[in-house]
Image (cartoon, helix red, strand yellow):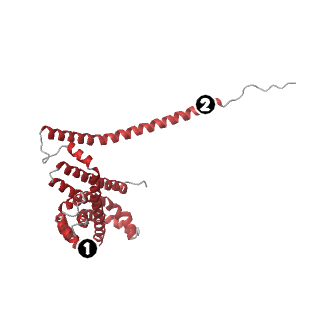
Amino acid sequence: MTTTRPVGGPTTSAPESSGGAADTSTSGASVAWSDRRLMRSGASALAAVAPPVVLLAAILAAWQAAVTLGDVPAFVLPGPSAILDELRDLAGPIASAALVTGRNALVGLVVGAVLGIVLAVVASSAKIVDRLGEPVVTALSVVPVVALAPVLYSMYGAASEQARVIVAGLAVFVPVYVNTLRGLRQVTSVHRDLMRALAASPRQVALTVTVPTAVPFVFTGLRIASSLAVISAIVAEYFGGPRSGIGSFITTAASGSNYARAWAYVLGGIVVGLVFFTVTAFAEHLATRRRPV
């Protein structure tokens, strides 16, 4: 007797094919959503960058046209093309001078900021220090700090960079001190009473209330001070010292009637200032961004 095996039966090929199609469609939808998100972010970035770039190009074009068509002498205003030629030919020396100026400004920024923050913390804790320090800070805020450069050169020697660092540090100290002290005073008595009712220690009060409140004010002072540090370091180089920074080369080029070269060094100083400001603003963004609870 021959046994026949039934032909046919359940197969799984159709469901597997259906499942594969569903996975493919889901993956395609995810890729499409990611592409749309990238396109939107790229469009928003382009919308933010394009207007200033277009404005800068229009200003440079109008500048060049005015110089060329108006036959403006170079000692009055050199054209952008002449400045760019000097910038291309002297890229190495300009970069070296920018590094020297940037180093002096950075050291002055760090020293002035640390002193400003530390003294602001002490002044916020002790009223006698606050009262004694207020007239000193007021005097420093109205003294033309860069005018101290010749005096400092005579103290430390014409070959020393120390005078430029001190000038930058003094320029940095005032805005950092004032803004930090203002931030430390922003904590209201209600918050202090609440922390006292919760039996918080002074360290917990500082970490929970005082420091988070003061941080935005500190970075406001640092953003202002970052530009002041570069400006003060460059201007201090006008008054003497070693011929190594941006300011000394600007005065040398201008005294030799090479105004396009002087403007090329000015552009190098602008780049240094923008780097300082951008780094400070980015540090502020990292320090003050909201973290998920």
In this picture, residue 62 sits left or right of residue 122:
left
Mark 2 and mark 1 residues within 8 Å of each other at the beta carbon: no
Looking at the image, which residue is at 23% across and 50% down?
A: 267
Q: Position of residue 100 (x, y in %)?
A: 28, 59
Mark before the other along the chain sequence, 2 or 1: 2
- Rendered-image quadrant of the N terminus: top right
Q: Report which quarter residue 193 is drawn in.
A: bottom left
| Image vertical order of residue 53 relative to residue 11, above or below | below
Q: Can residue 220 be seen in this snapshot?
A: no
The alpha-carbon separation of the residues under discs 2 and 1 comes to 80 Å
Q: Rate crowding at label 1 as few (under 14), some (14 to 19) or many (20 or more) other CA atoms within 10 Å.
A: some
Task: Kindly identify which numbered label has been placed on residue 240.
Answer: none
Q: Report which quarter residue 132 is drawn in.
A: bottom left
Task: Kindly identify which numbered label has been placed on residue 17.
Answer: 2
| Image vertical order of residue 51 relative to residue 161, above or below | above
Q: Position of residue 234 (x, y in %)?
A: 22, 58
- Rendered-image quadrant of the C terminus: bottom left
Secondary structure, mark 1, is helix
Secondary structure, mark 2, is helix
Q: Can residue 157 be seen in this snapshot?
A: yes
Q: Nearer the viewer, residue 25 or 59?
A: 59
In this picture, residue 79 sits left or right of residue 43:
left
In this picture, residue 150 sits left or right of residue 205:
left
Task: Kindly identify which numbered label has been placed on residue 129.
Answer: 1
Q: Position of residue 169 (x, y in %)?
A: 25, 65
Residue kind at label 1, given as amino acid type? Val
Q: Nearer the viewer, residue 45 or 167?
A: 167
Residue kind at label 2, given as amino acid type? Ser
Looking at the image, which residue is at 29% across and 66% down?
A: 111
